[in-house]
Each structure stands twice: as structure tokens, then as C-alpha cells.
Image: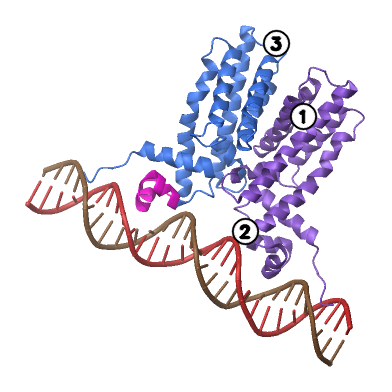
Chain colours: A purple, B blue, C brown, D red
DNA sequence: GTTTTTCTGGACTCATCGTTCCGAAACCTT
DNA sequence: AAGGTTTCGGAACGATGAGTCCAGAAAAAC
């Protein structure tokens, strides 16, 4: 009974995500959000809570979004090829004009220490998760004999995480895409 | 003639720098600034212009501040030792509780595309400058025979820049300091 | 058609932002 | 001491942000 929901929640979250991603938490205004999400002010507050709540939902939404790329890490013919395809796609996305630069987690770094602790926790968790996945990949590669037995999975994971975030930042600063490719190639070759 | 200035301009800029550095441009409010700088609202506007102008002065101030560390790159007994002392100090500063995390330029990267173009230009220049210095260091190391002739100075400089900014971000996200040291050691050893 | 729920639009409150302004105090010069 | 100049503090202004509220339109269920 009653009127049914007439907007797509996922679609609206998607729009909100791009806004927060591009402009950051502070510079994303409710007025921008309702415009891009295509809903009214009241609907936003009724359906998503306040700005903080919406931001949490967006971070959750972003997580799902990021998992698609992450799956590349286990889909290649071997460990190094998987890593390469992951990083190549990362570079292409970072240098694409269709989506915002960098990643929403990296962009949120300034919020740490100044935002609601429950949001900070989400940020820290998301940040650490990719590192864990890298570690798994390296351990799998060691078991397969594709990666040197001397490699320290924790350190390598850290170094890959570092590479990942560098690409984010470098793309913001408009550094040549080519250099990113070279660094990825070299890093993976040295594993 | 007239009343003389009763506050130290450099000291005030220093306080402003820490604030912008820690909170970022948007989240640094004039009210915070006048409190920390120890001057009144009108004095701030009279002496430093508006927020944008003050931010430019702060970036300039930060530049001088950063040069002290940069000199380490040319002060060691050899190229690799110099690089090590530079990065070691960088890590220590990033993990110190006395100064804000990361660096003001990295933090400001979020503003790119949304701020006054003249400020954006300063940011891009500052960012590129460190890369140039790294390149010089590598070229010098090649001439000295300390670094392999096959090394591509441009790529190595990019990779060191990348390392530098990773440390910034990793410290924000509270990653273990130890991993940063290990990555620095490995990166420099592989040169 | 009636009821129930969703959604809209706009007006509203409250807080806080950046900025301006002005009178008074402090200082230098003569 | 007097006059001119600059600093300084606080009040005030205008803009804009987040969030609330409500009357009514729209859409679905009964």
C-alpha cells in the first residue's frame, strides 16, 4: 500500500559518490547533492540521514565499486600478470576524464583526526584492506614459485600499496602517464 | 612614523602554516587563524590580505621550511647516503607528533581543480621541484659511478618522488613506521 | 474513491563562514 | 606636547552552509 519509491537508491548513491570523490567531504554541499542525485532535500534526509550518514553509505558503496577492479588481482594467468592488469587498469582509471582523480579513500586523508570517529574507522579499514589483498597475492605467488622465496609478503604488500597511492597522487598532479607505466613494470619485474 | 608592528610576521606565518598544513585550506577558518596567530581579525586582513593571499604566503613560507631538509640530499658522503638521510628524516618528521602529518603540498593536492589558478600553479611548481632535485642527485650519482649507468634519471626521480609521497600518506593512515624504513632501504639499495 | 505512503518545493531556523568598517589605542616625528 | 600615521579589537554585515518542517501533489494499494 502507498506510493512506492520512485528513485533508484543505488543510482543516487552513485551520483553522491562521484561528488564526494571529486570535491571531498567539506566541499560537497547538500545543494549539489540533491541536484546531482535528482531528489529533493527532504527525500535526501528521509532516505539517507544527514551528511555524515550519507558519507558512510557512500564509502560503503565505493567499496563495492572498488571490488570489481580488485578481482583482477586473482584473474590473470599468473601472479605477475594479474598484478600488471590491476595496475594498468588503475592507471587508466586515474588518467581517465570520465571519473574523478585518485580514489575517495586517498582523497579523504585530510579528514583523519578531524571527523566523526566512526567515519575515520571506515577510512582506516578501507585503506588497510587493499594491503591485505596484496599480501594474499604475494603469498600465493610464493607458493606457486612465481615469486622469490626471499620476498617478504608484508613489505611487498606495503610497497604495492605505496605504488597504488602514488599513482593516485601523481595523476592529480598531472604527471606523465608513461612514467606510471614504467614504474609499475619495473616494480613488478623486480618481485 | 606611526605605531610599530607588535607581532612577528614570520612567527605568525609559521602558526598559519601549521594550521593550513594540518586541516587543509577549507577546514582552516579565519577564526582559528587569528587565535593561533595571536593577532586580531583586522590585523590579519591588513597585513596578509584575504584567505587566498595568506595561503600563498604560507606556501611560500613552507617552501623555505622544506629547503632545509632538501639540503640533506647534497650533504652526505655519497649519493646513496644522502638519499638515505633525506628519507630517514622525512620518515621521522612524518611520524612526529610535534608537526602535522604529511606535507602541505600533498595535502593540498585535493584542491587541484577547485582553487584559484594562481594557487594551483604554486602547488604544481612545488610538486615538480622536488622531482627535479631528485633527478639532479641521480645524475650526479651516475657521474660519480655510485649509481648504475643503466638507471634512467627521470624514472628514478619519479620513483623517489613517489616514495616520498607514499610516506606522507602512509603516516596519515597510521601505517607502521618500520615498513617505511624497510621500503626506503630497499629502494635505495636497488639503485 | 478513499487511504496510505512517497516525494516535492519552498520557507524557515540556526550556525558559521569570510570580509568590512570604525573608533580607540599606540607609536613616531617634529 | 601635538599632529599625523598605523595598529588593533570588536562589532557588524552579507552570504551560505546544514538541517527542519509542512502543506500539498503524485502514485500506489485497498
Q: What is the spatial separation of the Cα atoms under label 2 and label 1, in whole angstroms?
A: 36 Å
Vertical order, A22 against D21 (above or below) = above
- Which mark lies nearer to you, 3 or 2? 2
Stretch of the chain drawn in magenta: B31-50
Tell me which residue sits at (45%, 44%) in the image: B54
Q: Which mark is residue A29?
A: 2
Vertical order, A145 against A66 (above or below) = above
Q: Is residue A80 visible?
A: no
Q: Is residue B45 left or right of residue B135?
A: left
Residue farthest right in this picture: A77
Chain that bears disc 1: A
In this figure, which residue is indicated by the disc labeled 1? A181
Q: Secondary structure at mark 3?
A: loop
- Residue B82 percent across, percent down from the top left: 56, 16
Query: Is the magenta region chiefly helix, strand or loop?
Result: helix
Chain that bears disc 3: B
Q: Are marks 3 and 1 in contact (CB under 8 Å)?
A: no
Q: Secondary structure at mark 1?
A: helix
Amino acid at each position: 500500500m502507498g506510493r512506492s519509491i520512485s528513485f533508484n537508491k543505488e543510482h543516487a548513491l552513485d551520483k553522491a559518490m562521484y561528488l564526494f570523490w571529486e570535491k571531498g567531504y567539506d566541499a560537497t554541499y547538500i545543494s549539489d547533492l540533491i541536484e546531482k542525485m535528482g531528489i529533493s532535500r527532504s527525500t535526501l534526509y528521509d532516505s539517507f540521514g544527514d551528511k555524515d550518514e550519507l558519507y558512510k553509505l557512500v564509502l560503503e558503496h565505493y567499496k563495492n565499486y572498488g571490488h570489481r577492479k580488485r578481482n583482477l588481482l586473482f584473474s590473470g594467468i599468473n601472479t605477475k600478470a594479474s598484478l600488471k592488469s590491476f595496475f594498468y587498469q588503475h592507471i587508466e582509471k586515474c588518467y581517465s576524464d570520465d571519473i574523478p582523480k585518485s580514489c575517495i579513500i586517498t582523497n579523504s586523508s585530510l579528514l583523519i583526526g578531524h571527523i566523526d570517529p566512526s567515519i575515520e574507522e571506515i577510512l582506516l579499514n578501507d585503506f588497510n584492506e587493499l594491503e591485505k589483498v596484496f599480501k594474499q597475492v604475494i603469498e600465493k605467488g610464493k607458493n606457486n614459485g612465481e615469486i622469490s622465496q626471499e620476498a617478504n609478503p608484508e613489505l611487498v604488500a606495503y610497497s604495492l600499496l605505496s605504488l597504488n597511492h602514488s599513482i593516485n597522487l601523481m595523476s592529480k598532479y598531472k604527471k606523465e602517464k608513461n612514467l606510471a607505466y614504467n614504474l609499475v613494470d619495473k616494480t613488478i619485474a623486480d618481485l
